Amino acid sequence: MEEKKPEVIPVQYVPVNYYEEDEIDLKELLLTIWKHRWFVVIFTFVVTLAAAIYAFTRTPIYEVKANIAPGIQFYPNCQI
């Protein structure tokens, strides 16, 4: 059988000199959020409502009940 040699693929380094792509335009970001504000409000409301329904309809896993009654401790050498 003929032995197969691995194929070598040359990789070229391409420097990226676009500093403008690394910057975040805050004004553009805020305008985008403002443009989709109803989606943000409705999505937040739906997720909050779903979480509240889930939290209040679940059966509590851990429930503790305690009865605390005041008592008198007995100290043999103490006169109360």
Image (cartoon, rainbow, N blue to C red):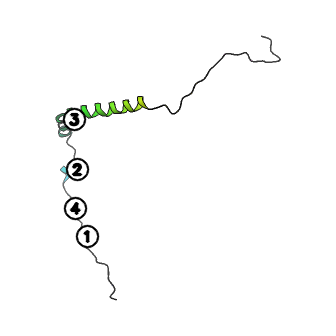
Q: Is residue 80 above or below residue 50?
A: above
Where residue 38 sits in the image (x, y, percent)?
20, 32
Counting residues from the start of the chain, the first of labels 1 and 3 encountered is 1
Q: Amino acid at mark 3?
A: Phe
Q: Quadrant of residue 79?
A: top right
Question: According to the image, label 2 marks what residue?
Answer: 22
For disc 3, the marked residue is 39
Percent x, y for residue 2?
32, 88
How far apart are labels 3 and 4 at the CA level? 39 Å
Q: Mark 1 and 4 residues: CB-CB less than 8 Å, in contact?
A: no
Give the Cα distance between marks 2 and 4: 14 Å
**The stretch drawn in magenta includes residue 71:** yes
Q: Which amino acid, by three-letter code, is at mark 1?
A: Val
Where residue 72 sits, quadrant-wise, is top right
Precedes in sequence: disc 3 or disc 2: 2
Q: In the rendering, at what x and y percent does residue 27 appear?
A: 18, 37
Q: Amino acid at mark 2?
A: Asp
Q: The magenta stretch spans which residues?
A: 68-73
Q: Residue at x 25, y 70 (%)?
A: 11
Q: Which mark is residue 11?
A: 1
Residue extending farthest top? 80
Question: In this rendering, which labeled residue sits more in front, label 1 or label 3?
Answer: 3
Residue underneath mark 4? 15
Which is in the foreground here, disc 3 or disc 2? Answer: 3
Q: Residue at x 34, y 33 (%)?
A: 50
